Amino acid sequence: MKWAGEEEPDSLTHSLHTKFKFHFNFIFLFTLSSMEESPKNCCWRKEADSNLKRLHSLLFGAENHRDADDHSSAYILSLRLLGFLDSHSLSDVDEAFIQHIRTQALSYLHTARKSLTPSINR
């Protein structure tokens, strides 16, 4: 059943899957892992969409601030991204999916930390 202003669940899932195939699968697995512990199993699609948006916001924000030489913002966003990834990693399968994203976030964090360190302390 489709309400006014809402997309049908199949088209929403299909569009997310085609746009962000890897990241959607990643968040989907996180959501499935946390559904066993969560009492509210009815809204897993909203939770997956929310997690996907947050992941992309943090990842692309850290990357954009790094590219714009705003190292303090890149540092903070990288830390938040690592915290988000670690808090949603509940199993070995989750860790396998996030390993390359986590490596990228650690690279952004290292670059920002090196740039924020005064040259005297190097």
Image (tube, rainbow, N blue to C red):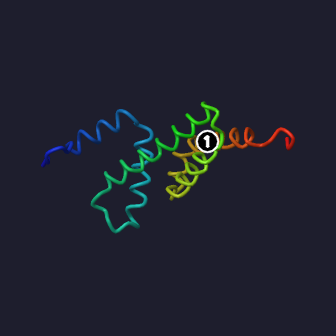
Mark 1 neighbour density, 10 Å: few (under 14) some (14–19) many (20 or more): many
Between residue 80 and residue 1, name the one nearer to us. 80
Where residue 75 sits: x, y (%)?
A: 64, 45
Q: Is residue 100 left or right of residue 16?
A: right
Q: Is residue 19 left or right of residue 99?
A: left
Q: Residue at x 57, y 46 (%)?
A: 77
Between residue 61 and residue 103, name the one nearer to us. 61
Where residue 45 sits: x, y (%)?
A: 31, 51
- The amino acid type found where label 1 is placed reads Ala
Q: Looking at the image, which residue sits at the far top?
A: 67
Q: Residue at x 44, y 38 (%)?
A: 22
Residue on which disc 1 sits: 74
- Disc count in the image? 1
In the figure, residue 107 lies in which quadrant? top right
Where residue 85 sits: x, y (%)?
A: 53, 51
Between residue 97 and residue 11, name the one nearer to us. 11
Q: Is residue 81 left or right of residue 109?
A: left
In the figure, residue 71 lies in which quadrant? top right
Where residue 44 sits: x, y (%)?
A: 32, 55
Q: Is residue 120 left or right of residue 65?
A: right
In this rendering, is residue 50 above or below 120?
below
> In terms of secondary structure, where does tag 1 sit?
helix
Q: Residue at x 20, y 43 (%)?
A: 8
In this rendering, is residue 35 above or below 57?
below
Assign the C terminus to one quadrant of the image: top right
